[in-house]
Amino acid sequence: MFPTMPNLHLPPAISSLAVAILIALTFVPFHVVHPIRVVRLRGLTLSLLAAWVVLAVITLAVDFDVAAPVTIALCAIAAYIVGSDAIIRFVRSFNA
């Protein structure tokens, strides 16, 4: 029904560089919204995490051959989790 996302086949050098960058980033302090501790967004965050888990299990079950809406939803939820803490900190900087 929906078109599938194209497979991402990068050259080995670029893949190795990406892995090296991700390894280096493990030492960088990174803040994300904790789904239980942040009261204001708890319901939304837990709901989105539950949806992400369901979509991730479906993706694994079909060997990563999913339609574009599933990939887009997974990326959007991940962007929310990563970006929401930055937005909260940005808003608090104006309230302080």
Image: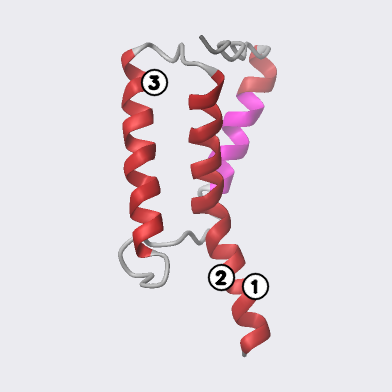
Per the image, the residue denoted by label 2 is 88
Mark 2 falls on what kind of element?
A: helix
Mark 3 falls on what kind of element?
A: helix
Per the image, the residue denoted by label 1 is 90
Residue in view at x 35 percent, y 19 percent: 60
Examine the residues drawn in magenta and state their main secondary structure: helix
Apparent side of residue 85 relative to residue 48 in the rendered image (left or right): right
From the top left corner, tell me how far across and down residue 3 is, in percent.
Answer: 58, 10
Report, in whole angstroms, how far the alpha carbon at label 2 lies from the one at label 1: 5 Å
Residue 29 appearing in the image: no
Residue in view at x 62 percent, y 87 percent: 95
Sequence-first disc among 2 and 3? 3
| Location of residue 34 (image quadrant) | bottom left
Name the residue nearer the viewer: 92 or 32: 92
Q: Residues within 10 Å of mark 1 (few under 14, many from 20)?
A: few
* Magenta region: 16-25
Establish if 41 lies above or below 8: below
From the top left corner, tell me how far across and down residue 51 is, in percent.
Answer: 36, 39
Q: Amino acid at mark 3?
A: Thr
Q: Amino acid at mark 2?
A: Ile
Establish if 51 lies above or below 1: below
